[in-house]
Image (cartoon, helix red, strand yellow):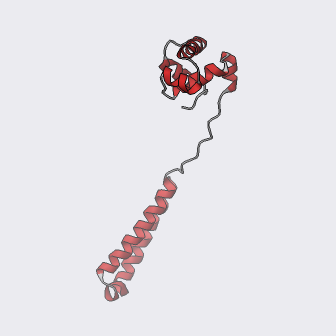
Amino acid sequence: MTKTAIIYGLGLAVLLLVLKTLEYKWLLQDISWQLYGLFIAVFFTALGLWLSGHLWPKKTTQDPFQVNHQAIQSLQLSERELAVLQKLAAGLSNQAIADELFVSINTVKTHLKNGFSKLEVNNRLQAINKLKALNIIEK
């Protein structure tokens, strides 16, 4: 970044020297002040755009989310418990989870209770945070 600032400063000094030299020779005689100002504005706009592209880092794309299957196996979560916990993380109620998975609401409660026990948590928010921390669900 220091190197860029030095190059920018030297470029401005050279430009100023060139413009001052040309000012007396032909710019003021042939071109009006408005056009002279336009040239300067266009130059500094282009210079600013170029610098902004070089001073700020480019955004990098993130790798796609990958489920941590090892954590799922170590917790011994069943497929159904995992499905219920994923629906829970999506913000669904027990009844909505039951409707989507075609099970009774009591089955959903049982799966949640077993999932909470295996995750060693006491409530929904703790379960969601633990699933995110273990990379079982996307953050």
Q: Position of residue 132 (x, y in %)?
A: 56, 26
Name the foreground residue: 97 vs 116: 97
- How many discs mark residues in the rendered view? 0
Q: Report the quarter where the C terminus lies.
A: top right
Residue shown at 58% from the left, 20% from the top: 103
Question: Which of the 4 image quarters holds residue 84?
Answer: top right
What is the x, y in percent for residue 96? 50, 25
Residue at left 36%, top 70%? 41
Relative horizontal placement of residue 43, taking residue 75 as reference (left or right)? left
Q: Is residue 46 above or below residue 120?
A: below
Camera-side residue of 62 and 97: 97
Question: Which of these two is toward me, 92 or 67?
Answer: 92
Question: Measured along the vertical axis of the image, is residue 34 above or below residue 62?
Answer: below
Residue occupying the point 49% across, 26% down: 92
Residue 130's x, y, as percent?
A: 55, 21
Residue 88 seen in the current view: no
From what the image shows, is residue 85 above or below residue 10?
A: above
Most distant residue in the left direction: 33
- At 38% from the left and 76% from the top, the residue drawn is 39
Residue 70 found in image quarter: top right
Q: Is residue 34 above or below residue 138?
A: below
